[in-house]
Amino acid sequence: MTWRAFVSIAMAALLLPFCGAQAFAQENQPSPPSAALVDALSAACRGDATEFANDLTQESSAAFLALPASERSAFMDRFSLGDNPGRPLLSTSDANQPVVRCTTPSGTAEFRFGAPRTHENLSFIPVTVVNGQSTTFGMVRENGGWRLLSLGLVLLDVPQLSKQWAEDALAQSEAEAIANLRSLAEAIDKYREAYGKLPESLSQLGPAPPGEISPDQASLTDKELAAGSDQGYEFRYRVVTAAQGSGATAFEISAVPQEYGKTGRRSFLLDADGKIHAADRHGEVATADDPVIPTSS
């Protein structure tokens, strides 16, 4: 063996423990905070409650897993801005920061990460939702990994957020029901102008094949409303006698939540005068004796 070969072997033997320790240290370093947030968003998008809980702090994880299954699902939907479990798609922006897209049957939410600001055991990651708002996620190093700590400047309070988001979802569903009532009333008025009579049912307002618009398929509303349900509410239409007692015909449309307490609390009635009444009827139909909501609502 030559002297040079002997020295090479000796140096390799001396360096091997150091290199092995360095590799072990690299393998056991926690993933960066951005990677942990990517995991959380991806798990929420898939509707994987167990994996999502792993990305929360120990206290938040216990609170999340204690929620009923339906509330866990709703929490993850709100977190990932979806309405059902979907498929996460991961990429990188021009600034070499993560981009997470959550694709569900109703559309895609895109989260674009900014550069994290990290100091010791805390990290703050700005995230912009395309065509939406921006917020900052706080991350904390716990048990050797990064965990979700806050949304914006508010510490993550799973029970409170779950309650708040559920109330927001109910309010949004009720607002959409009101908007749909007005949209249906407008479509019915257009039908009467076009055909000189009121439709017999909502189905006659629905889409028609190209060039085949008729009194039975007037193409005045979408197929969901024409079928009598949309955004968690069911709509019922009926022809009535005008309030003035003239014998003329008018119409009423009622809207009730499909799942009371989940898709809405209030029931609505658009009366013959075009006023909308609303009340918590526990899933039953509203009446003309219920309070009238303001026109701007």
Image: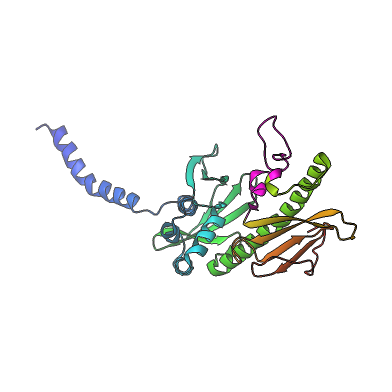
In the rendered image, which quarter contains the C terminus? bottom right
Question: How many numbered marks does the figure carry?
Answer: 0
Using the image as rendered, state which of residue 59 and residue 123 is in the foreground: 59
Q: Is residue 227 magenta?
A: yes
- The foreground one among 241 and 21 is 241
Q: How is the image coloured?
A: rainbow
Which quadrant of the figure contains the N terminus? top left
Indicate yes or no whether the magenta region holds residue 206: yes
Q: Residue 173 in the image: x percent, y percent?
A: 66, 58
| Residue 110 seen in this snapshot | no
Q: Is 63 or 167 nearer to us in this picture? A: 167
The magenta-colored residue range is 204-231
Where's residue 49, x and y in %? Answer: 44, 59
Which residue does the image show at 37% across and 53% down from the upper left? 29
Which residue is more in the foreground, 132 or 22? 132
Most distant residue in the front direction: 247
Task: Look at the magenta stretch and give its main secondary structure.
Answer: loop
Examine the rendered structure and indicate whether residue 5 appears above or below residue 44: above
Residue furthest to the top in view is 211
Apparent side of residue 26 relative to residue 12 in the rendered image (left or right): right
Is residue 248 toward the left or the right of residue 110 in the image?
right
**Residue 142, position as x, y percentages in the image:** 43, 63
Q: Position of residue 80 (x, y in %)?
A: 54, 53
Going 45% across and 58% down the picture, which residue do you hit? 52
Q: Is residue 277 visible?
A: yes
